[in-house]
Amino acid sequence: MGVLVATVFLTAATVPAQLAAQGMNEVGLPLGTTPPAVQIEDLDGNAVDLSQYGSGKPVLMEFWATWCEVCKALHPAMVAAQKRFGEQVDFLSVSVAVNQTPRSIKRYLERHPVPGRVLWDAGGKATRAYAAPTTSYVIILDAAGRVAYTGVGADQDLEAALEKALRSRPS
């Protein structure tokens, strides 16, 4: 299991460039779909059901790692988006279990806080369920819990994607 997750995320440096070169704007789960229910943990080992998010207000979820240079480059856009939409949108950082631990993540966050709640995907359940191809993968769910946006890389227009998600009507 760990080998599969490690293989997926060790390609993080090349996948975003390849996707951009192919002109692909959507990666991971198809737009309009509802992700499967998945339970992961917070950094203290408490269970967190991801299906509780995206019910009533949009959620922005980034698959993230302390060592991910692309995630660090995306960080200013994440901070700006949370500053603008923090009351209207839930922000989640899903920490992948490759070359980091909850303890190392907590130490990192003391010096480099990230927007929103930080979760731990120890077994890769969320990575698989959300079809995360790499770190810096962002998925935005609308208020009805449907995929409204997916993207990878440092140049994502998160504010425009959130505006669109906020305009969509739950059905």
Image: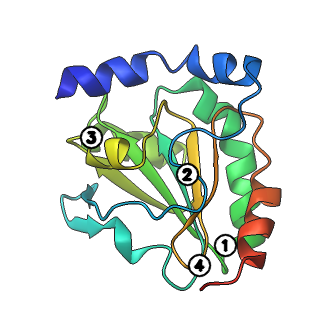
Is the residue 116 above or below the residue 137 in the image? Answer: below
Q: Nearer the viewer, residue 13 or 112?
A: 13
Q: Earlier in the sequence, mark 2 or mark 4?
A: 2
Q: Amino acid at mark 3?
A: Gly
Q: Is 104 placed left or right of 164 in the picture? A: left
Tell me the CA gap for discs 2 and 4: 23 Å
Q: Amino acid at mark 4?
A: Ala
Query: What residue does disc 4 label?
Result: 143
Query: What residue does disc 1 label?
Result: 86
The quadrant holding residue 136 is top right
Q: Nearer the viewer, residue 22 or 93?
A: 22
Callout 2 secondary element? loop
Callout 1 secondary element? loop
Identified at 29% across, 35% down, the residue is: 97
Q: Amino acid at mark 2?
A: Val
Is the residue 45 above or below the residue 14 in the image? Answer: below
Query: Disc 1 vs disc 3: which is toward the camera?
Result: 3
Q: Earlier in the sequence, mark 1 or mark 2?
A: 1
Labelled pair 3, 4 in contact (Cβ < 8 Å): no
Q: Earlier in the sequence, mark 3 or mark 4?
A: 3
Q: Amino acid at mark 1?
A: Gly
Is the residue 95 above or below the residue 58 in the image? Answer: above
Query: What residue does disc 3 label?
Result: 124
The quadrant holding residue 25 is top right
